[in-house]
Image: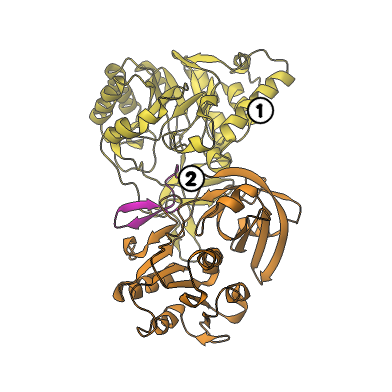
Amino acid sequence: MDKLAIELCGIKLKNPVMVASGTFGHGEEAAKFVDLDKLGAIITKTITLEPRQGNKPPRICETASGMLNSIGLQNKGVKDFLENRLPTLAKYKTPVIVNIAGESAKEFEELTKILNKEPLVKGIEVNISCPNVSKGGMLFCFDPRATRELVATVRKATSLPVIVKLSPNVTDIALIAKEAENAGADVISLINTLWGMAIDTNTHKPKLGNITGGLSGPAIKPIAIRMVWQVAQAVKIPIIGVGGIMTGADAIEFFLAGASAVQVGTANFVDTQAPVRIVEEIKEYLDSHNISHYKELVGKVTA
Amino acid sequence: MPIQEKCRILDHQKVAPFHFKITLVSKYISSHAEPGQFVNVRCSQDYDPLLRRPLGVHNVNPEEEIFELLYEIVGKGTELLSKHQVGQEIDILGPLGNGFDINKDKKVAILVAGGMGVAPLLYLAKFLRSTIHDPRSIHILIGTKTKELILAEKEFKTLTDNVIVSTDDGSYGKKGFVSDVLLETLDPRTIDASATIYACGPKPMLKAIAEIAFQKKIDCQVSMEARMACGIGTCLGCVINTTKGYQKVCDDGPVFDAKEIVWTS
């Protein structure tokens, strides 16, 4: 396993394959199928300060090699998370990273302070990129200054590693990434979903109850690769690549583009074994290419 | 507890113009699936279509370690599934969800199927017949648009004589909606409020059945449908509106108490 172990902003990972927020519940739901101890890290579904009921259904629709979702950050709030969800993960060795969202910088700050006291939480992923909520979310990630101020606020509120998850729905991703880095982010993760829409040609109505949603799955991988590559040129902090990873080869592509780790998202809906299989496939790739550690691949794309 | 496994196709038959019955080998699913549960089927080896397709368990035979699914071609996924040959393997996740809550105290069971709604109800009928019910106390109502879309009639008739078939256009059986046939069947001289209605079919039909059940004060369980991704409760994509707020069809359902559904949404 040495070929895959890594320390990312002080978090020790046995491999660089994490499960992306929102695609794995809070871990326990998926534990029926996957040995959680085989994962690099678990990133829990976004939690907010107060419970959120989420968006009006239908919330998902399939598109070519992908899917749109408009869940709208449905969750029971941080209190329920700490009382009922987080403790179920205590029996696993895999680090838990908690994904958070808020409608204001104040809410992010408050959530961060609460989580900062939890020994089970090894890192915080700041979701400033959800396309499915009207307040917060993308309001921050569109604006370099708002990004900087929010990340600085979260940074001040915790000693835990801060991962900032960026939206692809911006004109200059490198600029936003740099602002996050300057404001004290330890890691950048990208990309969140692409803002999309689909229409039913029989009813002339949008296929999602929320009208628009976030596109994920293999369809978005080339965009994610491009953005990871661009951000890797712009920042010095590590990058976690996310977007359409279905196989070990997809993960390798992200490493080459400049990602130090990856998150598997939509693939979890298709194949419950996806993250564990991807770890195995990365190992096979390293063996067959005589590579002693996957880190040798990071950023090694040659033009 | 569900599992993900590759199941071999033992048989695959076209049973109506766009309808197929597939028999799959699985020791685990055939012995663990409960009536009303479903499996999530990967129809493509590729990424298009990407998501699995949820299909209700139609029949099980634990002795022979097989189970059946009945499905209609409605899009790319089911079209691809229909091309699968006997001997091939399919990736199946299941059994999933909460099935019908079979109340053993109730003496009379009324099963109401609209169109593809027969799929989970055949297994339910078989289960009721083998465990608690006298065949005379099981009533089965099957409604479809037209004659060629009637499915599983023969199989239901081996379980009870009380099978009433109706078609919207009157081309076979009684003419009219299955909900109207239900009203006739619910003659207070034969059936009282101690019955349970189990229904599966299109939403407008389930709504009509739920209204009748509510008026007659009869317990009613409905099997709901929604676009689904994970099938295991993690994505929160398949919610429907209920009196308890949004509930997941995949693991709070797919079977719900009809009184809990907010039908107007």
* Vertical position of residue B34 compared to residue A202: above or below: above
Q: Quadrant of the C terminus of chain B?
A: bottom left
Residue B223 in the figure: left or right of residue B73: left
Local crowd at mark 1 within 10 Å, few (<14), some, or many (≥20)? some
Residue A136 in the figure: left or right of residue B238: left
Residue A35 in the figure: left or right of residue B221: right
Residue sitting at 30 percent across and 43 percent down?
A52
Can residue B56 be seen in the rendering of this structure? Answer: yes
Q: Can residue A271 be found in the magenta stretch?
A: no
Q: Which mark is residue A186?
A: none
**Marks 1,2: beta carbons within 8 A:** no
Give the chain letter at badge 1. Answer: A
- Frontmost of labels 1 and 2 is 2
Q: State which chain is coloured yellow.
A: A
Q: Quadrant of residue A293?
A: top right
Q: Amino acid at mark 2?
A: Ile
Residue sitting at 37 percent across and 21 percent down?
A120
- Residue A242 in percent (x, y) is at 51, 31
Q: CA distance from mark 1 to mark 2?
A: 25 Å
Question: As rendered, which of B227 and B32 lies closer to the eye?
Answer: B32
Q: Which residues are magenta?
A: B233-249
Q: Quadrant of residue B233?
A: top left
Q: Amino acid at mark 1?
A: Glu
Give the chain letter at badge 2. Answer: B
* Vertical position of residue A156 compared to residue B93: above or below: above
Q: State which chain is coloured orange.
A: B
Q: Which residue is mark 2?
A: B232
Can residue A174 be seen in the rendering of this structure? Answer: no
Local crowd at mark 2 within 10 Å, few (<14), some, or many (≥20)? many
